Image (cartoon, rainbow, N blue to C red):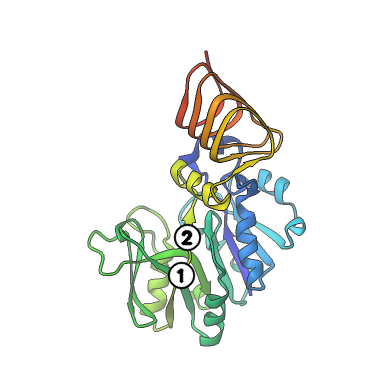
Amino acid sequence: MKAVVLAAGKGSRLYPVTHHIPKPLLPLANRITLEFAFDRLKEIGVTDICLVVGENESKMKAALKDGSQFGVKLHYVRQHEPKGLAHALGFAAEWVNKDPFVLYLGDAIYTTTLVPYANRFVETGCSNLNLVQPVEDPRRYGVANTDGERIVRLVEKPEHPESNLAMAGTYFFGSEIWSILPDLKPSARGEYEITDAIQMLIDRGHTVLAGIYHGHWFDSGTLDSYLEVSAYLSEGKILNAGTVEGQVDSPVVIGAGATVICDSIEDSVILPGAKVHVLGRIRHALLGGHVKSDDDISNEIVYDHDRT
């Protein structure tokens, strides 16, 4: 089995940090975000990985190279404009060829192994198996309506959900998907949706299954979710690979080579190499570059900023 990891997103909700560091390379608990994807893929025996990149291509290649430092083999393809997950997947078609593969969203973090789902995909011989998870508000997600193990209908962000099973960011596919993509039409928001592609598999009589994921599933796309994931992965502790002057209250992660001077810091991440001098408190913040402030910094993402 191969893997296609989607890592072309701009991470706009984490600007301005992601102007400087591609979102897939942001550190979580002082490890690159994509390392957690590589860990989960290696657990299911997958080391041959195609990364779909975008305008971040040069920085991604410079940081990850051929992947050998992470125990994987990386191949790169470029999505030149963001037109949806199914559009991004299409760029990997030639590389995947007819092999079965797993499609993995690069910012998804899973706290338990994907081995049972990979095994179920292989043993059933189905065309597609999708991780799903019960959620409180399904309207924010692609939602799977099921009959037993089979998915019978998918609805993207339904106003009136018929199920609470959200699509959870990892998809196992056989080669049947490649006959679907050329016939796919853009959705109302102008994107080629992976949920629409899977619905076409269903409509054409292919077996599509749901695998209910029982661990914690996170993405790290906003300040709140980024800090939540960071706190979970650091076990709510203080991870300090730099130097700090001031009171430190967990959870806090300080990257390698960073220096922090402040009255106090809590529930925050300081990126590697950052130089931070705050005459006050730092709380619920993501800081990088050179940051100077005469006031508290709270509930903010800051990169290279001087407030005097």
For label 1, the residue is 213
Query: How far is disc 1 from disc 2 in space, using C-alphas?
Result: 8 Å
Is 143 on the left or on the right of 285, as rendered? Answer: left
Q: Residues within 10 Å of mark 1 (few under 14, many from 20)?
A: many
| Residue 94 in sight from this viewpoint | no
CB contact under 8 Å: marks 1 and 2? yes
Residue 217: assigned label = 2
Q: Position of residue 150 (x, y in %)?
A: 38, 81
* Quarter of the rendering occupied by the N terminus: bottom right
Q: Position of residue 6 (x, y in %)?
A: 56, 57
Residue 196 image-quadrant placement: bottom left
Say which of 235 and 120 sits in front.
235
> Which residue is at a point 64% across and 49% down the rendered structure image?
32
Compared to 241, does 8 lie above or below?
A: below
Q: Secondary structure at mark 1?
A: loop
Q: Residues within 10 Å of mark 2 (few under 14, many from 20)?
A: some
Outermost residue, left direction? 160
Outermost residue, top direction? 308
Compared to 218, does 154 lie above or below?
A: below
Residue 161: assigned label = none
Q: Secondary structure at mark 2?
A: strand
Residue type at tag 1: Tyr
